Amino acid sequence: MASALSLRDSVDVHSLIRHTLDPNLWVLCAGTVQSDECRRFEASKLLGLFVDLLAAYRFVVLDGPAINTHSESALFGSMMDRVLVVLHAGITRGPVVQAALAKLALVKPEGIELILNRRTFVIPQSLYRKL
């Protein structure tokens, strides 16, 4: 909830960033958002937040909600240098991927990459090496 407040109110976002066990990794958690609050964020405030974070950190990774069910993900994607679409192997269907890519292409024609997550290897590794 704290980071959502920073976009609506004038809370210093840097006071919300937490250190992790890795000395080079910091996290700004989204917290919990009530109803459709995140759809009310102003694009200019969000862009200002990203610019501010990029001035302080070398890389900024934003983990957003699924684009097909949350339209604000297209807004987030349009502000990023690169968009990674994560697909659950064996679960995410082709039409779902096509719909997501079509939505992203409207706001981000370049810099979209796919990541296949949770892939299982049904053939033993020793046979894969011989292929």
Image: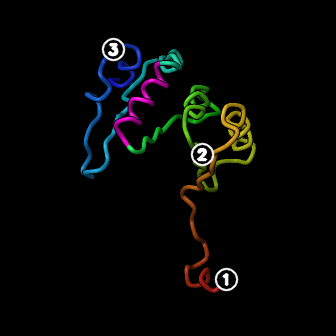
Screen quadrant of the C terminus: bottom right
Q: Dot 3 surroundings within 10 Å: few (below 14), some, or many (20 or more)?
A: few
The answer to whether 52 is drawn above or below residue 41 in the figure is below
Residue 18, percent across and down? 26, 37
Q: Amino acid at mark 3?
A: Ser
The boundaries of the magenta stretch are 45-57
Q: Label 3, label 1: how many angstroms apart (C-alpha)?
A: 58 Å
- Label 2 sits on what residue type? Val
Task: Write the residue at 59% across / 51% down.
Answer: 88
Q: Is residue 96 magenta?
A: no
Q: Which residue is label 3 attached to?
A: 10
Image: 39 above or below 82? above
Residue 65 rendering spot, x and y as whole percentages: 53, 34
Helix, strand, or loop for circle 1? loop
Q: Residues within 10 Å of mark 1 (few under 14, many from 20)?
A: few
Would residue 50 be found to the left or right of residue 101 on screen? left
Q: Which of the two labelled residues, at mark 3 and mark 2, occupies the earlier sequence position?
A: 3
Q: CA distance from mark 3 to mark 2?
A: 31 Å
Query: Is 47 a magenta residue?
Result: yes
Nearer the observer, 76 or 69: 76
Residue position for label 1: 131
Q: Which residue is mark 2?
A: 85
Q: Earlier in the sequence, mark 1 or mark 2?
A: 2
Circle 2 — which element?
Answer: strand
Percent x, y of residue 27: 33, 39
Prevailing secondary structure class for the magenta stretch in the rendered image:
helix
Q: Residues within 10 Å of mark 2 (few under 14, many from 20)?
A: some
> Who is closer to the viewer here, 26 or 51?
51
Toward which corner of the image does residue 10 lie, by quadrant? top left
Under mark 1, the amino acid is: Leu
